[in-house]
């Protein structure tokens, strides 16, 4: 028995059954209306009311999985009668005479007329052959809908009751191979009631995956909706899309065939898109990212904030007065009383995963989209299941019966396995010697050396020169180094204020964000803050990873707590929250997590913080979470896509550049720490240091350190503006930070 085919068949049957009962799941139906609708569905599809009741009960009890047929041994179908071709012709004729005839009625008539003995014709067999001939129940219903359809205006009374989706042609961009022009396509998801755009983005193709990505992002941003409304394009009738949305309990409805007016809201929205495309052509956009950036700004700044005529018509048709200035989509969205239902990001991601099967070859690898991925030697010769996101096909999750799912790694070919291996060293052409290592302050040359030797010699030389200038200026310690003790660090007014805010965030378990330009003391602030926390009261966690995904975020935190993380991030998140509860309740400690270099994090990771902090119905925070990054972190959080995360930020700290007075106090504090003279730098030298460094502590350290080195070599006890300018012009190289 082919288990894979059987599972696919069971999933398909579950999808069919969900499609039947989806209209009956709407909570606003009264019992009489629901009963009438149930009878109509049973009559149209040739099934009993008992079956519908059974499907509804199974869905309410077990969800989508409850609709799957029970596993049973495969039964071989009986041999068809010899005259089955003539029987099928008679069945088609009966269907043409009365299109509403069910398959059971057709079989009954055929048996009465003597075309087949009683019991030899199976309903499923006849239904399949009628469908292949173009006379199935769904096909006949589509024909009836096409004849009886009417394009009436409609609008749902609340947001997230119905979402409309559509695709529109965009402009061509030179993003193909060798700058070839490529057609772009806009995929959008629009709320039927408010006309608010949940998600809209340009893509470089019109495959099914762009629609899946659109609705995946829409659900993550705005939560679950009741139903969606599509036309009959191939992207919207694809099995994967229907399967993904059905697993989340979302009903799919399609517009009648050749009825463009039924998608009037999308057509009206596309007029807005046409205006945008006309405007954007003057900007000479060359990249897809640039096009989407302009489109996002256009949506937020113009479309969402402009009065919508359709909203006015809706309220005026009900006799409700509308403000003179009209109502914009964002106003209608925000004033709606219906609450949003957010789902766990891991649940949504799992629903939109694609599932396929692959055979593991002799090298324990599988092939996927022209690439090789490594699995495990124990799976050689086995057929494994793979799950992947079509927008990120590089990440494959492999599953096999009796084995924990794991991520397959792309196969890396070593140097000796390359198709064109390099020549042996003895056969390679001789290369010219590298330039000799040269220290500007030594004014001499050494023998040729490698890059690694050059770096080690440079470090050793700098240490030697450091010892030399420390002795020359009679210092006890090196002044401008990174390892200055916490208690000796210079504390500017801005840093004092930030330390107070962070202490408050740690005590109240709040969500804080720290931003600063590169080199402005962000790491120093974090080091000082972590050193100020009492180990008896706080448990400190620190993460710094630019490629941190939600799963690895939870895993890294659990690793620091000494706990093995579960594979799925939803399980890992609940595992972390449970462990934090134990720490708070048993150890009586508060957890403080600092995530450094947060400006490099991906969108999915940033959005995960919302679900982490949404704890116990948003009544409490499980920990103090502090994001630290460069200035672009706050620029990123200002975007509309991060509105839900931004609204949860309790404290925002910004470290500015030093001014001229703070620069002087900073240098003086380091000289005091070194234990030497404090009048080494003249006022004009300090002026030039401030101008060149722009008040960035890291650049101040480098200029001062190299000035001390050069002054000791030249035998100068005083560092003036001439020496500083020489260092800036000859040693800093324009980017030594």
Image: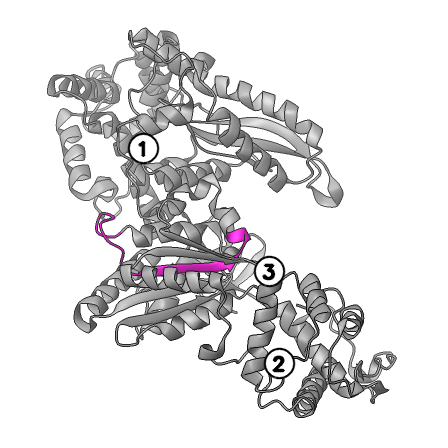
Residue 622's disc is none
**Mark nearer the N terminus (3 vs 1):** 1
Label 2: state its secondary structure: loop
Q: Considering depth in this image, is 323 or 31 the residue closer to the camera?
A: 323
- Is 191 magenta? The answer is no
- Number of the front mark, 2 or 1: 2
Residue at x 73% of width, y 78% of height? 719
Residue at x 20% of width, y 73% of height? 587
- How far apart in space, not on screen, are marks 2 and 3 (Cα)? 20 Å
Q: Considering depth in this image, is 531 or 641 the residue closer to the camera?
A: 531
**Mark nearer the N terminus (2 vs 3):** 3
- The stretch of residues the image draws in magenta is 615-633
The residue labelled by disc 2 is 678
Q: Is residue 460 left or right of residue 81?
A: right
In the depicted structure, whether residue 543 falls above or below residue 335: below
Residue 3: x %, y % from top left: 33, 52
Q: Residues within 10 Å of mark 1 (few under 14, many from 20)?
A: many
Say if residue 541 shows up in the picture. yes
- How far apart in space, not on screen, are marks 3 and 1 (Cα)? 52 Å
Q: Quadrant of residue 661?
A: bottom right
Residue at x 65% of width, y 60% of height? 694
Label 1: state its secondary structure: loop
Q: Is residue 57 left or right of residue 212?
A: left
In the depicted structure, whether residue 657 falls above or below residue 37: below
Label 3: state its secondary structure: loop
In the depicted structure, whether residue 258 falls above or below residue 411: above
Residue 659's disc is 3
- The quadrant of the image that shows the C terminus is bottom right
The residue labelled by disc 1 is 225
Labels 3 and 1 touching (C-beta < 8 A): no
């Amino acid at each position: 028995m082919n288990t894979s085919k059987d599972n696919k068949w069971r999933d398909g049957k579950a999808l069919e059954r969900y499609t039947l009962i989806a209209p009956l799941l709407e909570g606003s139906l009264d019992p009489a209306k629901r009963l009438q609708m149930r009878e109509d569905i049973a009559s149209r599809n040739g099934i009993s009311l008992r079956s519908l009741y059974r499907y509804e009960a199974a869905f309410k009890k077990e969800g989508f999985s409850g609709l799957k047929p029970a596993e049973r041994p495969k039964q071989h179908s009986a041999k068809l009668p010899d005259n089955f071709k003539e029987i099928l012709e008679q069945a088609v004729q009966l269907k043409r005479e009365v299109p509403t005839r069910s398959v059971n009625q057709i079989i009954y008539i055929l048996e009465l007329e003597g075309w087949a003995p009683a019991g030899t014709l199976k309903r499923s067999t006849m239904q399949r052959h009628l469908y292949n001939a173009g006379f199935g129940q769904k096909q006949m219903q589509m024909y009836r809908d096409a004849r009886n359809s009417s394009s009436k205006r409609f609008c749902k009374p609340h947001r997230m009751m119905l979402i409309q989706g559509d695709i529109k042609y965009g402009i061509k961009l030179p993003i193909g191979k060798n700058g070839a022009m490529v057609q772009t396509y806009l995929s959008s998801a629009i709320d039927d009631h408010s006309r608010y755009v949940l998600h809209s983005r340009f893509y470089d193709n019109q495959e099914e995956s762009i629609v899946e990505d659109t609705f995946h992002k829409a659900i993550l941003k705005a939560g679950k909706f009741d139903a969606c409304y599509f036309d009959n394009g191939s992207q919207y009738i694809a099995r994967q899309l229907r399967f993904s949305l059905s697993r989340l309990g979302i009903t799919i409805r399609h517009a009648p065939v050749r009825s463009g007016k039924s998608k009037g809201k999308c057509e009206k929205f596309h007029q807005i898109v046409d205006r945008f495309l006309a405007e954007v052509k003057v900007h000479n956009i060359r990249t897809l990212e640039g096009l989407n950036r302009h489109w996002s700004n256009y949506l937020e700044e113009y479309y969402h904030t402009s009065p919508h005529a359709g909203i006015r018509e809706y309220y005026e048709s009900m006799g409700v007065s509308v403000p003179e200035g009209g109502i914009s989509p964002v106003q209608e969205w925000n004033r709606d009383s219906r609450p949003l239902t957010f789902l766990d990001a891991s649940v949504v991601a799992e629903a939109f995963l694609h599932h396929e099967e692959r055979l593991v070859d002799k090298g324990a690898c599988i092939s996927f989209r022209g690439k090789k991925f490594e699995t495990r030697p124990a799976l050689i010769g086995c057929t494994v299941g793979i799950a992947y996101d079509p927008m990120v096909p590089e990440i494959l999750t492999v599953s096999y019966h009796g084995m924990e799912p794991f991520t397959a790694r792309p196969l890396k070919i070593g140097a000796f396995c390359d198709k064109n291996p390099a020549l042996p060293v003895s056969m390679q052409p001789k290369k010219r010697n590298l330039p000799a290592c040269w220290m500007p302050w030594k004014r001499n040359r050494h023998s040729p050396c490698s890059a690694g030797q050059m770096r080690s010699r440079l470090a050793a030389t700098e240490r030697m020169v450091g010892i030399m200038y420390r002795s020359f200026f009679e210092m006890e310690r090196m002044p401008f180094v990174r390892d200055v003790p916490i208690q000796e660090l210079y504390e500017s007014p801005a840093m004092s204020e930030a330390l107070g805010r962070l202490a408050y965030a740690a005590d109240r378990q709040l969500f804080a964000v720290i931003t600063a330009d590169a080199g402005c003391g962000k790491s120093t602030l974090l080091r000082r803050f972590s050193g100020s926390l009492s180990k008896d009261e706080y448990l400190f966690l620190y993460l710094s990873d630019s490629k941190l995904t939600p799963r690895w975020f939870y895993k890294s935190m659990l690793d620091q707590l000494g706990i093995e993380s579960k594979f799925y991030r939803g399980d890992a998140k609940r595992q972390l929250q449970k462990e934090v509860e134990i720490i708070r309740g048993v150890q009586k400690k508060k957890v403080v997590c600092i995530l450094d270099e947060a400006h490099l994090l991906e969108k999915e990771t940033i959005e995960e913080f919302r679900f982490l902090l949404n704890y116990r119905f948003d009544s409490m925070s499980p920990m103090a979470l502090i994001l630290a990054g460069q200035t672009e972190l706050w620029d990123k959080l200002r975007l509309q896509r991060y509105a839900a995360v931004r609204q949860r930020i309790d404290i925002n700290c910004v470290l500015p550049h030093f001014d001229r007075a703070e620069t002087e106090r900073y240098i003086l504090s380091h000289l005091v720490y070194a234990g030497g003279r404090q009048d080494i730098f003249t006022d004009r030298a300090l002026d030039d240091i401030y101008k060149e460094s722009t008040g960035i502590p890291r650049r101040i350290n480098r200029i001062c350190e190299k000035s001390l080195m050069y002054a000791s070599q030249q035998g100068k006890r005083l560092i003036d503006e001439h020496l500083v300018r020489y260092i800036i012009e000859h040693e800093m190289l324009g980017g030594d930070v």
